[in-house]
Amino acid sequence: GQPFVLTDEMFDIISRCLGHNERTGGLFDVAVSAETAGISLDRKLCLNENDRTATRLDERVRLNLSGFIKGYALDRAMVILRESGVANALVSFGTSSVSAMGNHPGGSGWPVATAEGRRFVLKDECLTTSGNSRDDRRHIMNPLTGRYVEGKSMVSVCTQTAEEGEVLSTTSFLRMNTNN
């Protein structure tokens, strides 16, 4: 319940997450837990722009930025490459997030494939995948129900930014699995 002073970058990150939460009707939630299911993020966490502070409104609230930070970091990496004069690059953060800039040395765009074999050619865009790669994997919780999504299924999206891709792929996966 006490305000905690944040760095400018962390304040910006959490502000963006609050915005994504609002725009997705609560499906994108960096404070999701079974204990706080159905409570909107703005009722779990309060930001004060003047003081650059965050205050937990419920002692059960814990932030988990894993569904956001990979996209944020990938976008930052692409900015660093552009600012360094790089015109063509493919940056992969594992099987779930890849960002392309410019062209492959052998052709137009960058050919990539998802874990389930769907092929894409990326040029100045990002491919992000969210979901369960195995039947026994459960790691995405529905913030409205507090239940993990079960069963093997994945959603891949192409977007202009990795941050946008993380939000869209996660919320699309949750919408596709609304019975969970």
Image (cartoon, helix red, strand yellow):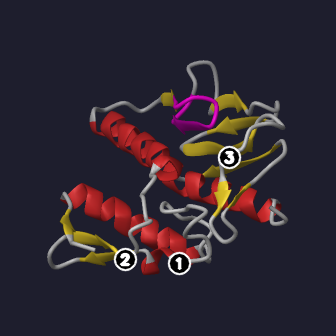
Q: Which mark identifies residue 130?
A: 3
Q: Which residues are magenta?
A: 92-103
Mark closer to the chain start, 3 or 2: 2
Q: Residue at x 48, y 74 (%)?
A: 41
For discs 1 and 3, the disc positioned in front in the rendered view: 1
68 shown above or below 39: above
Q: CA distance from mark 1 to mark 3?
A: 22 Å
Q: Which mark identifies residue 40?
A: 1
Q: Which mark identifies residue 174?
A: none
Q: Residue at x 42, y 45 (%)?
A: 75
Q: Residue at x 69, y 28 (%)?
A: 111
Q: CA distance from mark 1 to mark 2?
A: 11 Å
The answer to which image quadrant residue 139 occupies is top right
Question: Front-most of 8 and 82?
Answer: 8
Q: Which residue is mark 2?
A: 57
For discs 3 and 2, the disc positioned in front in the rendered view: 2
Q: Secondary structure at mark 1?
A: loop
Where does the image place residue 145, in percent across and percent down from the top left?
70, 69
- Other residues around mark 3 within 10 Å, as few (<14) / some (14–19) / many (≥20): many
Question: Front-most of 44 and 82?
Answer: 44
Asked if the residue at tag 2 contacts the one at tag 3, i.e. Cβ–Cβ closer than 8 Å, the answer is no
Q: Amino acid at mark 3?
A: Ser
> In the drawing, does residue 118 fall left or right of residue 141?
right
Q: Amino acid at mark 1?
A: Ser
